[in-house]
Image (spheres, rainbow, N blue to C red):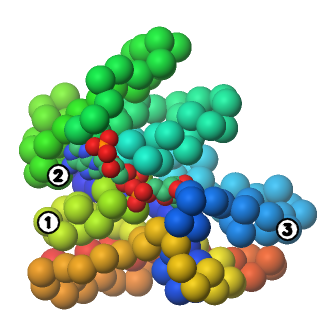
Amino acid sequence: MTTHVYIAASLDGYIATHEGGLEWLNGIPNPDNSDYGFDEFMARMDAVVMGRNTFDVVLGFGEWPYPKPVVVLSRTLTSLPEDLSGRAEIMKGAPAKVLETLQQRGYKRLYIDGGQTIQAFLKADLIDEITITRVPILLGDGISLFGKLTKPLPFLLCGSETYKNGLIKSHYRREQ
Ligand SMILES: NC(=O)c1ccc[n+]([C@@H]2O[C@H](COP(=O)([O-])OP(=O)(O)OC[C@H]3O[C@@H](n4cnc5c(N)ncnc54)[C@H](OP(=O)(O)O)[C@@H]3O)[C@@H](O)[C@H]2O)c1
């Protein structure tokens, strides 16, 4: 099974403001209405694993955007909205345990999302691929994509793409 991060970050490595704000991201001009390859990426995934804070933000979008099963990591949530029945579930446990459970279900590719969640998986060296889209803005503060690690984790650059609006998407694979 492989784990994949697909995320947008500011030049200084933030994925949202402290309050969870994404205006700096959503406000970028996008005249071609590009999804920056997101649908193609999602089509390759079997399920999404996201932290509860990211789940809260997604709920605020109104319409549920995921075509694949979603696992919400949380130690505090006890239930999900009824309309997500069969589409999302709550799980808790260390990253390795979560992966073991999902592997037993036959999932082969997992999309891992949310700052704390990605950091916990990286700390356990359980992220195989990272696609990061850099947004040309310095936020100065906010929710960090990356955190402390117990050892350096080398990644190989597999490719990168520059968009007219200044975004640069880079795809990295964990070097074994
Ligand atoms: N720029 C982008 O592309 C992008 C992408 C995704 C998210 N975001 C933003 O990132 C922000 C959310 O990130 P975040 O760093 O706050 O955290 P997060 O990873 O979304 O959520 C953290 C929460 O997940 C739960 N959790 C994490 N690991 C767990 C585990 N192993 N077992 C059980 N529960 C676990 C805990 O929930 P409980 O407190 O309930 O226990 C924890 O408080 C949002 O503002 C979102 O909009 C941005």
Q: Say which residue appears at 72% left-offset and 62% top-offset.
A: 23
Displayed quadrant of residue 93:
top left
The percent coordinates of residue 64 (x first, y second) are 59, 30
Relative to 20, say whether 61 is above or below: above
Q: Is mark 3 within 8 Å of ligand 1?
A: no
Residue to which mark 1 is pinned? 124
Residue ID for mark 2:
95
Between the residue at mark 1 and the residue at mark 2, the CA separation in whole angstroms equals: 7 Å
Position of the C terminus, as image quadrant, is bottom left
User: Is residue 38 shown left or right of residue 146?
Assistant: right
Would you name the residue on which mark 3 appears?
Answer: 29
| Amino acid identity at mark 1 | Ala
Q: Quarter-wise, where is residue 104 in the image?
A: top left
At 25% from the left and 54% from the top, the residue drawn is 2
SS for callout 3 = loop
Density class for disc 3 (Cα within 10 Å; few <14, some 14-19, many ≥20) is few
Q: Residue at x 12, y 81 (%)?
A: 150
Describe the element under mark 1 as helix, strand or loop: loop
Sequence-first tag of 2 and 3: 3
The three-letter amino acid code for the residue at tag 2 is: Pro
Judge: label 2 CB < 8 Å from ligand 1.
yes
Position of 110 with respect to 61 (left or right) is left
Q: Earlier in the sequence, mark 3 or mark 1?
A: 3
Relative to 120, is 61 on the left or the right? right
Closer to the camera, 53 or 4?
53
Label 3, label 1: how far apart the Cα atoms are: 37 Å
- Inspect the image, locate mark 3, and give the three-letter code of the amino acid beneath it: Pro
Q: Residues within 10 Å of mark 1 (few under 14, many from 20)?
A: some
| Callout 1–callout 2 Cβ contact below 8 Å | yes
